[in-house]
Amino acid sequence: MRRFFLENAALKAAALLIAFLLWGSIGTGQMLERRANIQLEFAGIPSGLVLGPGTKSHVSVVFHGRREAIRSLDPEALKAEVTFRPGVKPDTAVVLVPRVRNLPKGVVADIPSQTLKLVSAANGK
């Protein structure tokens, strides 16, 4: 067993050092956080219903990811989509979580849930 560890000890130590250096340089890539207001898009609104009064058109999103990916983000080009499921009844509060599409690889978006209400189109906004 002793021979296993001591044979070519210099090469093994060098390989271990290189492994730690690579792990340190790749694994500790600087992570950044960026907050931005992005536009909300609404999909799946049943016919005869419209968004209730006071519905926000933008949402505050926190993006997390590697420095390069976060710096290349263009919040103006991103949209958060809220999709209603079929069968939503008028004047009922619905809690939905928007989803950001087309995020760069390695970027995660933290988006707060939104409480929305659909009202009858005859009642107006």
Image (cartoon, rainbow, N blue to C red):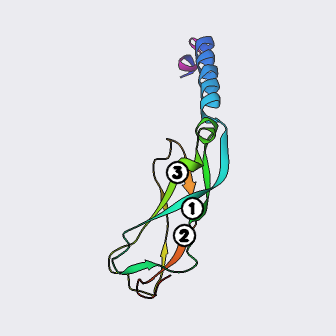
Tag 1 secondary structure: loop
Relative image position of residue 105 (x, y in whole percent): 49, 41
Relative image position of residue 68 (x, y in whole percent): 61, 35
The front one of 83 and 32 is 83
Circles 1 and 2 in contact, beta carbons < 8 Å: yes
Which residue is depicted at the point 64% across and 54% down? 36
Specify whether 31 is left or right of 55: right
Residue pointed to by mark 1: 111
Label 2 Cα crowd, 10 Å radius (few <14 / some 14-19 / many 20+): few
Residue pointed to by mark 2: 113
Mark 3 is on which residue type?
Answer: Leu
Q: Give the distance between the C-alpha atoms of the residues marked 3 and 2, in whole angstroms.
A: 17 Å
Which residue is depicted at the point 36% across and 73% down? 85
Residues shaded magenta? 4-8
Residue pointed to by mark 3: 78
Tag 2 secondary structure: loop
